[in-house]
Amino acid sequence: MDHSKMLGMAATLACLTLLTGCFDSNPEHIQAWTKPFETNVTTDRYIVQPPDELELRCAQVPEVNMQRQRVRPDGKISFEILGEFEVAGKTPEEVATAVGQRIKELYTLPGDHAVDVRVTAFNSHVYYVVGQLSRPGPRIYTGRDQLLTAIAEGQPSPLAWQKRIQVIRPAPQEGTEPYHFEINYKRMTQKGDTTKDVLLQEGDIVYVPPTVLAAIGMVLEEFISPVARAFYGAYLVQNPPGSSQGYSPYSGGYGGR
């Protein structure tokens, strides 16, 4: 088979991969996501995990007021006066209740809510923005992360297929299906259509695929690069660097000169 036919088959394969089974999104799956205007998400619902950072607020006890602690790998925080607390898996409000009970054993404080615990660094929960972006990678989940903001911060590259960005919520357990829908980012930004702008959750994946032409180029590069390296390796065997025959890419000329 000649090279032109092989390249044609590779291009066809790339097109078929993109256009037939790569995107299996379901528009109705968007119902699994919350719209920003439908709820007021607060950190009271945030689940603390290592290595989050917490700040204790208790103005009536200056010894512990404004102290910050990073949740240790064992899921605990500790204060010199109050001792250790198991905080992993709890909300900030639940941590405040436990700390408040300990403080009331040592101090006489008026009121039922003299202690407040705030999350000062959201480090343990992430979502992912990947694909054809200038800034791909995990993002810290804060509880108020909107899809439009996440994509804009990722900065789609010129190779991005902005009309078919995929939003995926992985299956919570074995035997269940993930949720999956797609958005037209270009329409969102150029027409102001934010009907599909949703709040992301921990573990969500935003995938920015390549355009058809970009995908073809990637397939061709994947096919051509090993062949080119093989030919170049064979060339070096016959014409080692510094030899007096042929062109040497290491010397910048012929015959090692």
Image (cartoon, rainbow, N blue to C red):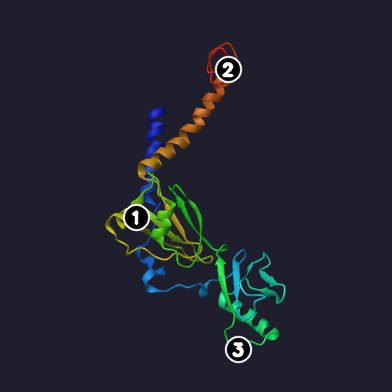
Image location (x, y in percent) of residue 41: 45, 72
**Which disc is residue 76 wearing?**
none
Task: Tell me the CA gap for discs 1 and 2.
Answer: 52 Å
Q: Amino acid at mark 3?
A: Pro
User: x and y percent of residue 153 in the render?
Assistant: 43, 54
Where is 167 relative to 160, above or below?
below
**Residue behind mark 3:** 110
At 57% across and 16% down in the image, what residue appears?
A: 239
Tell me which numbered mark, 1 or 2, is placed earlier along the sequence: 1
Q: Residues within 10 Å of mark 2 (few under 14, many from 20)?
A: few
Q: Residues within 10 Å of mark 1 (few under 14, many from 20)?
A: many
> Considering depth in this image, is 32 or 14 the residue closer to the camera?
32
Q: Quadrant of the C terminus?
A: top right
CA distance separating discs 1 and 3: 53 Å
Q: Amino acid at mark 2?
A: Gln
Residue 238 lies, with reference to residue 216, above or below; the image says above
> Which numbered disc, 1 or 3, marks the residue that appears first in the sequence?
3
Are there few (<14), some (14-19), or many (20+) residues within 10 Å of tag 3?
few
Q: Which residue is disc 2 drawn over?
A: 238
Give x and y (percent) for residue 164: 35, 53
